Image (cartoon, rainbow, N blue to C red):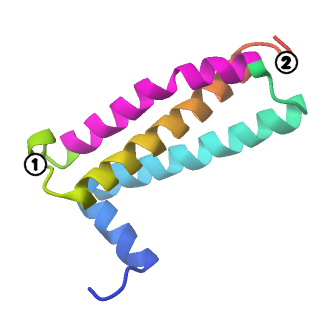
Amino acid sequence: MKELTFPTLIAVLEEMFGRGLFRTMAALAVLITVLYLYVLIRDRAVSWRKFLRAQLSMPFGAVAAVLFVQRMTHSGFGDIGGPIDVIVLLGVAALGAAGTAILVYTLQSLIRRPGA
């Protein structure tokens, strides 16, 4: 593989997670993003109280994402072989943290009335 293309990346992710799980995760990501944009447009402002709560959930999302990927790939911390493995693991943790923050903020805004 000389270059990484988008179709190649999709094929690798489908191979790692399975086609059904990968497509379900992608659909949920799109749905949560649309709901997040809806909440931002509806409220016309960011609630800093909800934002703080969402940020407090980020470490849990980072750990959950790393454990989920390790479970799906049948690997553990002892399988980390070099710097690229650490970089990928940190990237997974960062994406898990950001995704959890967006999810928590969105759920708070949808469950509670605007301005609360």
The secondary structure type at the circle numbered 1 is: helix
Specify few, some or many for label 2: CA neighbours under 10 Å numbering under 14, 14-19, or 20 or more.
Answer: some
For the stretch drawn in magenta, what is the main secondary structure? helix
Quadrant showing the N terminus: bottom left
Question: Who comes first in sequence, dot 2 or dot 1?
Answer: 1
Residue plotted at (74% across, 15% down): 49
Asked if marks 2 and 1 touch (Cβ < 8 Å), the reply is no
Residue plotted at (87% across, 30% down): 45
| Amino acid type indicated by mark 1 | Asp
Tell me residue 55's x, y (percent).
59, 25
| Occupied quadrant, residue 41 | top right
* Numbered badge on residue 79: 1
Height in image: 106 above or below 9? above
- Which of these two is toward me, 99 or 7? 99
Q: Which residue is mark 2?
A: 114
Whether the magenta-drawn stretch holds residue 66 is answered as yes
| Amino acid type indicated by mark 2 | Pro
- Which of these two is toward me, 81 or 17? 81
Height in image: 85 above or below 94? below
Tell me residue 79's x, y (percent).
10, 48
Tell me residue 63's x, y (percent).
34, 30
Pick out the residue farthest to the left.
78
Q: CA distance from mark 2 to mark 1?
A: 46 Å
- Which of these two is toward me, 78 or 28? 78
Height in image: 75 above or below 60? below
* Numbered badge on residue 112: none
Whether the magenta-drawn stretch holds residue 52 is answered as yes
Q: Which residues are magenta?
A: 49-71
